[in-house]
Image (tube, rainbow, N blue to C red):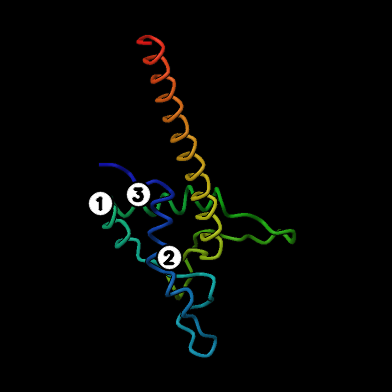
């Protein structure tokens, strides 16, 4: 069973809950705050064919610790939190920023890999040409 990467997990959450995030209305509050979007951990776990505790652990023990932070006034900004009325929630604005960084990092790695492949191909071609010419 292959575990989802942070990029895969956050991309799925972003795609699945973006419309929930943008549909927030101050007049008809569907949740406590616009920035915190409730997520269904079981549904996410089912999507990746892993146990719910794997997804919860990744969000709570790893991603929240990695991307949550303290403001200048020493208040905590959580990446993942349990809100009383909303249940398990992600800080969608922070998730979007983290996702953008992971996507950029992934593009850099892919570009480097492609360049290395073509450089290796051209070097092999140059060796073949020099041997037979």
Quadrant location of the C terminus in the rendered image: top left
Residues packed near mark 3 inside 10 Å, few (<14), some (14 to 19) or many (20 plus): some
Quadrant location of the N terminus in the rendered image: top left
Please count the marks in the image: 3
Please tell me which residue is depicted at 30% across the width and 56% down the height of the picture: 45
Q: Determine the CA span between mark 3 and mark 1.
A: 10 Å
Camera-near label (1 vs 2) is: 1
- Mark toward the start of the polypeptide (1 vs 2): 1
Q: Which residue is mark 2?
A: 88
Q: Is residue 42 above or below residue 116?
A: below
- Mark toward the start of the polypeptide (3 vs 2): 3
Q: Which residue is mark 1?
A: 49
Q: Which residue is mark 3?
A: 54
Which residue lies most toward the front here?
133
Q: Residue 124, located in which quarter of the rendered image?
A: top left
Please tell me which residue is depicted at 52% across the width and 64% down the height of the picture: 91
| Picture coordinates of residue 127, whole percent (x, y) | 41, 14
| Picture coordinates of residue 17, whole percent (x, y) | 41, 69
Secondary element type, mark 1: loop
Q: Is residue 36 left or right of residue 38?
A: right
Residue situated in front as seen by the camera: 17 or 123: 123
Please tell me which residue is depicted at 46% across the width and 27% down the height of the picture: 119
Q: Is residue 38 above or below residue 54?
A: below
Callout 1–callout 2 Cβ contact below 8 Å: no
Residue 123: assigned label: none
Residues packed near mark 1 inside 10 Å, few (<14), some (14 to 19) or many (20 plus): some
Residues packed near mark 2 inside 10 Å, few (<14), some (14 to 19) or many (20 plus): some
- Mark toward the start of the polypeptide (3 vs 1): 1
Secondary element type, mark 2: strand
Please tell me which residue is depicted at 31% across the width and 55% down the height of the picture: 52
């Amino acid at each position: 069973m292959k575990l989802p990467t942070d990029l895969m997990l956050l991309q799925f959450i972003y795609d699945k809950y973006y419309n929930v995030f943008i549909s927030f209305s101050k007049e008809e509050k569907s949740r406590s705050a616009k920035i915190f979007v409730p997520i269904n951990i079981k549904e996410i776990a089912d999507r990746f064919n892993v146990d719910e505790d794997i997804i919860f652990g990744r969000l709570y023990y790893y991603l929240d610790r990695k991307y949550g932070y303290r403001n200048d006034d020493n208040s905590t900004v959580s990446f993942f939190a349990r809100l009383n009325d909303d249940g398990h929630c992600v800080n969608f604005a922070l998730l979007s920023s983290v996702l953008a960084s992971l996507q950029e990092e992934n593009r850099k790695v892919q570009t480097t890999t492609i360049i290395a492949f073509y450089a290796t191909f051209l070097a092999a071609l140059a060796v073949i040409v020099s041997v037979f010419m």
